[in-house]
Amino acid sequence: MSIELAPGVYTVGEGKPAVFVAPLRAVVLADLHLGFEEEAASQGYYVPRIQLRRSLEILRSVLDETGADWVIFAGDVKHCFSRLLWSERRELEELFSFLEKRGVRVTVVRGNHDNYLPIVAKKHGVEIVQELYVDGYLVIHGHKKPAGGYPGPVKAVIMGHEHPSIRLRDRLGYVTKMPCFLTAPYRPLSATLVVLPAIGQYQTGTSVTLDPSTYLSPLLREEVDLSRVKPYVLAEDFGVFEFPELGLLEDLLAEITL
């Protein structure tokens, strides 16, 4: 069952880390971090190569479920900052070829990890932008504040970058960490902010707290009342579960150091 996170913005299927923007017939997802495994191996950490397979499985599922004809990546499709890794090139080729065969439009809103991405993307007709504003929907990566100056009002700001997850403890002290969507009022644009969980399996990201200093994005650090942030916890294959606002969850939120 889908949940409407913002006007026209819905969760997809049984807990997929993507949203469907119904008026645009578009799915939006973020933070694939393809090539992470090669980068980790170069530093002596060897992990299974699952990022690409997981990304393709999620894309196939959400496209089948929604019938969307537009895929929008909200940044960090690739992982390495300083160069285009061999595995990144190969996996990007496979990703964009898959989407070409599906016949969907593809737009990448450039993230802070997406250096050298155009080398591969241009061969597949992939549009790359710094921000994307269409019919009241603004998609950004989230490492910078919105540029402003849009031709109309903004209904929803959809972003990645933060990789939000929530750590909760029960009365027995057991702590669990789960990825989540976040929503909050975004006053600078009189819109609803929607923060996406990461697609990348290894990008567990920021634990949600009431402390602004723990967040990566300047939107959450400086422009959002964190007590009004609402998590929607993602349990893949089971669904998305709506939690109360953080201001009401304070006693259950696990300490960030646990």
Image (cartoon, rainbow, N blue to C red):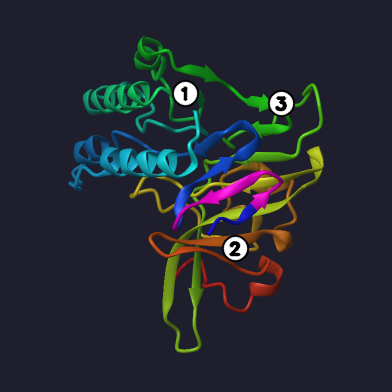
Q: Earlier in the sequence, mark 3 or mark 2?
A: 3
Residue 237 x/y as whole percent: 38, 61
Region of the chain picked out in magenta, as a range:
5-14
- Is there CB contact under 8 Å for labels 1 and 3? no
Q: Amino acid at mark 3?
A: Ala
Residue type, mark 1 in image: Val
* Residue 69 against residue 197 in the figure, above or below: above
Q: Label 3 belongs to which residue?
A: 147
Disc 2 vs disc 1: Cβ atoms closer than 8 Å? no
Mark with earlier residue (1, 3): 1
Quarter of the rendering containing residue 157:
top right
Q: CA distance from mark 1 to mark 3?
A: 22 Å
Residue ID for mark 2: 209
Give the labeled residue for mark 1: 106
Residue at 56% from the left image edge and 55% from the top image edge: 2
Q: CA distance from mark 3 to mark 2?
A: 26 Å
Label 3 sits on a secondary structure element that is: loop
